[in-house]
């Protein structure tokens, strides 16, 4: 406990608390001088909480020490790059590190923690929906100033955004850990910025979760006005949490792009890069150019509430539909931010376990960029029922359907790669195959939502919920687990238990498939999303009971994974040599990875996925030691 209390994480959280109280107290003092109201339902007024939350997030960064080098540099003090670790064991993951491998693991651990929190929220409101009528979230319940239905709204809304943030952090975890290894780089291009990108996500998560105890909010994860302009103060914490998390996404994406452009190994031209790197580049382009739009949309509502501005208030000349355009201009491309790395993982791992060259490498690489490009012109299919100009419907319908072309390229490539391959099915491969099947279901259930005539009937029903979960689980969650099982030995030097891994897969997969098919079924029967109760006359009780049981099946499978993950760090079977018989450069060196990745530099002399071709070679290591750029 003493070692944790002296860590950067503990210091940062303490400074965030102090900064929040200082900022709130400052506004309260100013209001006292001006003779304005000093307290509200949650002790401080809304302006006090907003400034307090903002100062608290900044204070976290200074308290954790992630900005120390920049402060010293500004004062004229020499700050040599310090890549060597001063901590060992678990301590290095709760302190500031410039090592991309440590940062990747930090991202991953926080992502898993948020997945558990968001999943717990889902289990609470899913249990309420197991039968019609209110079960335990009744109007008599009062928690954090909210009754049962209000708590349902808050948990449902937080579940959506917390899971989205956890996915973004999980993506950053995989990219941070893997991309420099695949490129032959010693680290990311900007190690300090890399650390900053992670640590700024921590106060963002705290802000997001604090909305629960400050009255919550009833807007759903989208935060649409006018609901968000009237919601309790908790919605302001929600807005600020997403805004701050956006900085992590933007800065991290910039770092990835520069790393790929400037730090590839000798001989690694664009068409010899591992396919996951192409996915990382496409993802980073979207995140770097689009994230500011959701930040802007939320910031404008925040200002509207605080300063009385009328951006989205029709009475003041504003337009609430404008918010939706700003929000979805990011939030639909964000779907591809979620799934492109997952599809990259599938393409990266599939040849390893099929023992065949990746079919259509160049087409897959270009399809990632194609998805990223087309993703910017499809956002308004979320708005067919919003009252936007009718002449926009048909162009956005066709642009949305156009996404199927580059996505189909990937599916055809995967099928051709699998065809007549020598398939083995360890746990990573099971999750790769599961990801392909589930994502296919998400893709097949997508066109009804993209077509105007059907979307007008399906919009905001549980059909959309089922489709979205298929897309995200197939595009990210299954590949995320595949990546964790695959690269866990590289990070720890030990293997995760195969039996537990397969139990995880075979419990989660059928539970998930039944749940999402059930969601689409009740949606077709007219079940609306984001409601706490439904009419027993609809006859949906049995369906919702099955959905809830399947939800708990998924939760149990994730609990098995978490036990396997943390237990294997110390007790797992030692991983020696090229565990998966991979051609990738990181598997040509001992596990876990050395401090500076590659003691000898390597040159790319062949194609990355020429599995099964006799005499082929991808990388050739030099006998000369690598020159470290770190002091």
Image (tube, rainbow, N blue to C red):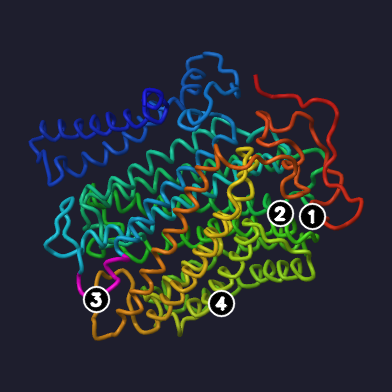
> Residue 383: x and y, percent?
41, 71
Please tell me whether mark 1 or mark 2 is closer to you in this view: 1
Specify which label sits upstream in the sequence, 3 or 4. 3
Which quadrant of the figure contains the C terminus?
top right
Label 1, label 4: how far apart the Cα atoms are: 29 Å
> Residue 22: x and y, percent?
24, 29
Q: Is mark 1 on a helix, strand or loop?
A: loop
> Residue 94: x and y, percent?
45, 31
Specify which label sits upstream in the sequence, 4 or 2. 2
Label 3, label 4: how far apart the Cα atoms are: 30 Å
Specify which label sits upstream in the sequence, 1 or 3. 3
Specify which label sits upstream in the sequence, 2 or 3. 3
Circle 4 crowding by C-alpha within 10 Å: few under 14, some 14–19, many from 20: some
Q: Mark 4 points at which residue?
A: 444
Q: Which mark is residue 331?
A: none
Q: Mark 3 points at which residue?
A: 132
Range drawn in magenta? 126-134
> Residue 152: x and y, percent?
25, 62
Q: Do the CB atoms of the residues marked 1 and 2 lie less than 8 Å apart?
A: yes
Circle 2 crowding by C-alpha within 10 Å: few under 14, some 14–19, many from 20: many
Q: Mark 2 points at which residue?
A: 275
């Amino acid at each position: 406990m003493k070692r944790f209390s002296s860590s950067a994480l503990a210091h940062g959280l303490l400074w965030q608390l102090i900064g929040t109280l200082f900022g709130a107290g400052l506004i309260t003092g100013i209001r006292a001088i001006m003779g304005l109201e000093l307290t509200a339902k949650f002790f401080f007024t809304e302006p006090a909480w907003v400034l307090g939350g903002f100062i608290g997030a900044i204070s976290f960064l200074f308290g954790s020490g992630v900005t120390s080098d920049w402060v010293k540099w500004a004062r004229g003090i020499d700050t040599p790059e310090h890549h060597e670790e001063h901590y060992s064991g678990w301590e290095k993951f709760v302190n500031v590190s410039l090592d991309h491998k440590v940062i990747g693991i930090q991202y991953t651990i926080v992502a898993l923690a948020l997945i558990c929190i968001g999943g717990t929220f889902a289990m609470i409101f899913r249990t309420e929906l197991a039968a019609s009528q209110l079960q335990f979230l009744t109007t008599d319940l009062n928690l954090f100033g909210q009754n049962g239905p209000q708590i349902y709204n808050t948990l449902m809304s937080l579940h959506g955004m917390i899971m989205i943030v956890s996915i973004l952090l999980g993506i950053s975890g995989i990219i941070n850990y893997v991309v420099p290894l695949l490129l032959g780089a010693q680290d990311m291009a900007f190690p300090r910025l890399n650390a900053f990108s992670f640590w700024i996500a921590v106060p963002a998560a705290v802000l997001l979760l604090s909305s629960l105890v400050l009255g919550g909010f009833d807007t759903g994860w989208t935060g649409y006005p006018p609901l968000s302009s009237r919601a309790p103060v908790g919605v302001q914490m929600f807005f600020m949490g997403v805004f701050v998390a956006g900085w992590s996404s933007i800065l991290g994406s910039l770092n990835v792009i520069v790393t790929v452009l400037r730090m590839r190994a000798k001989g690694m031209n664009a068409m010899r890069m591992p396919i996951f790197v192409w996915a990382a580049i496409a993802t980073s382009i979207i995140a770097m150019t689009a994230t500011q739009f959701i930040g802007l949309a939320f910031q404008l509502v925040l200002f509207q509430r605080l300063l009385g501005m009328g951006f989205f208030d029709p009475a003041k000349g504003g337009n609430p539909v404008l918010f939706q355009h700003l929000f979805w201009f990011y939030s639909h491309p964000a779907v591809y931010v979620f799934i492109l790395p997952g599809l990259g993982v599938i393409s990266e791992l599939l040849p390893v376990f099929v023992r065949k060259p990746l079919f259509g490498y160049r087409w897959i690489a270009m399809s990632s960029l194609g998805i990223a490009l087309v993703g910017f012109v499809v956002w308004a299919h979320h708005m067919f029922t919003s009252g936007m100009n009718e002449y926009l419907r048909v162009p956005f319908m066709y642009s949305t359907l156009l996404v199927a072309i580059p996505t189909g390229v990937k599916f055809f490539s995967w099928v051709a790669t699998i065809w007549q391959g020598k398939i083995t099915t360890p746990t990573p491969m099971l999750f790769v195959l599961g990801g392909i099947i589930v994502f296919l279901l998400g893709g097949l259930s997508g066109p009804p939502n993209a077509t105007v005539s059907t979307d007008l009937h399906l919009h905001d029903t549980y059909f959309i919920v089922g489709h979205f979960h298929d897309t995200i689980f197939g595009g990210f969650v299954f590949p995320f687990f595949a990546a964790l099982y695959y690269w866990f030995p590289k990070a720890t030097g030990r293997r995760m238990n195969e039996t537990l891994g397969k139990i995880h897969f075979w419990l989660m997969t059928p539970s998930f498939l039944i749940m999402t098919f059930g969601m689409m079924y009740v949606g077709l029967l007219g079940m609306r999303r984001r409601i706490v109760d439904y009419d027993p006359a609809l006859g949906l009780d049995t369906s919702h009971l099955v959905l809830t049981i399947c939800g708990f099946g998924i939760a149990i499978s994730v609990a098995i994974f978490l036990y396997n993950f943390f237990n294997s760090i110390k007790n797992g079977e030692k991983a020696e040599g090229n565990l998966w018989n991979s051609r990738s450069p990181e598997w040509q060196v001992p596990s876990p990875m050395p401090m500076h990745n590659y003691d000898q530099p390597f040159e790319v002399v062949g194609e990355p996925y020429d599995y099964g071709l006799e005499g082929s070679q991808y990388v050739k290591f030099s006998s000369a030691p690598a020159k470290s750029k770190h002091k």
